[in-house]
Amino acid sequence: MSKFSLIIEPFNGLLCLDIPSYTLKKYSIYQVIFSEWTKWIRPKAEWIGYLDLTTGPGYSKVKECREIGDKQVAASPIIALRTEPRFTDLMFIERNRKYCNALKERIKEFCEGRNCDVLNEDANKYIRYAIKRLEGHCLVCVDPFRPRDLGWETLENVLQEDLCDVVSVYPAPLTQRPIRRHRGRLFIPGVHKHMPPGFQLDMKEEVLRTSSEFCRKKIGEIFGRSVLHCFIRGVPYPILFATKDFELGKHIYNKLKSEGVCDEIAFKE
Ligand SMILES: C[S@@+](CC[C@H](N)C(=O)[O-])C[C@H]1O[C@@H](n2cnc3c(N)ncnc32)[C@H](O)[C@@H]1O
């Protein structure tokens, strides 16, 4: 795990997510992308936003990892709060009240002198208000458990915004869903609403690779974005980064490659 840098702290008794150890690799990719992103935006802007649509309680615990044991590991909201150069304005959306309360309790110490809001909302309903509140460049993190948690329209709202870049577990783990047969065609219940228009899941093998290739192509075409996907062996989803700033897309690609935090990167300039 040496090439993966993580924020690990003693467990403080507050609610955590229970995660499989492979999620740690996602967190270290977040760390690279968040800090490269703020470094890139800092010279261009005073206002630097972070919007998390699927926030969680802030820290996670890993059951089966001896190196981490009973400690807690920072998840997306805490990684964002610790990122240097700093995000000046942060908005955390989470629909589970208990997770919201745990995060509020945790982040008191980080929020001094910064605009930081924790909102107990459904991102699918709140997204338009959230976007209206943005005042400039914003990194939007979208990290659902299941495809049905976040609709395509929600993501579309974000991708339409010139100044919003997206880091996301997208498509969300299709492999967590049972594949069924309907009218002679294979499908995964709930997935279509979460994918770009025209998605037809009629494949049994290479679902992850084929569906992410489809998403890269569509997001690139519809929104004029540079899109990359990080793949890690043993992780059942790819991690997407999408931006309208093509130079930034290239920069993030080169950085992820040189840090060696993923096994493969698919990049659509
Ligand atoms: C994978 S988990 C947490 C991810 C977090 N970014 C992390 O790094 O650990 C996804 C979280 O999103 C929340 N969630 C799922 N759908 C949501 C929605 N539509 N609106 C707001 N929160 C949502 C869940 O309650 C859960 O806490």
Image (tube, rainbow, N blue to C red):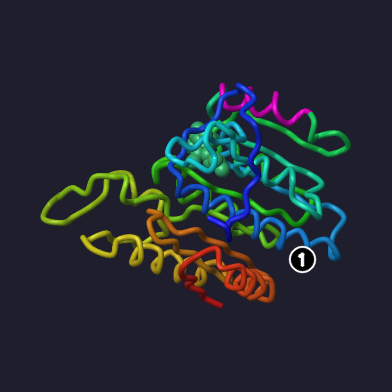
Q: Residue at x 67, y 41 (%)?
A: 130
Pinpoint residue 227: horizontal percent, then vertical percent. 54, 69
Give the camera-side residue of 113 and 82: 82
Rendered image quadrant of residue 20: top left
Q: Amino acid at mark 1?
A: Trp
Question: Can residue 69 be seen here?
Answer: yes
Image vertical order of residue 68 relative to residue 15, above or below: below
Residue 60 drawn in magenta = no
Q: Residue at x 42, y 50 (%)?
A: 172
Q: Residue at x 64, y 60 (%)?
A: 33
Q: Residue at x 53, y 55 (%)?
A: 1
Rendered image quadrant of residue 126: top right
Residue 99 drawn in magenta = yes
Element class at badge 1: helix
Image vertical order of residue 19 relative to residue 6, above or below: above
Pinpoint residue 244: horizontal percent, then vertical percent. 64, 68
Q: Residues within 10 Å of mark 1 (few under 14, many from 20)?
A: some
Question: Can residue 124 be seen here?
Answer: no
* Residue topped by disc 1: 40
Question: Which residue occupies the extreme front position in the image?
Answer: 66
Q: Main secondary structure of the magenta part?
A: helix
Pinpoint residue 181: horizontal percent, then vertical percent. 15, 50
The stretch in magenta equals 98-108
Q: Quadrant of the C terminus?
A: bottom right
Give the camera-side residue of 238 and 127: 238
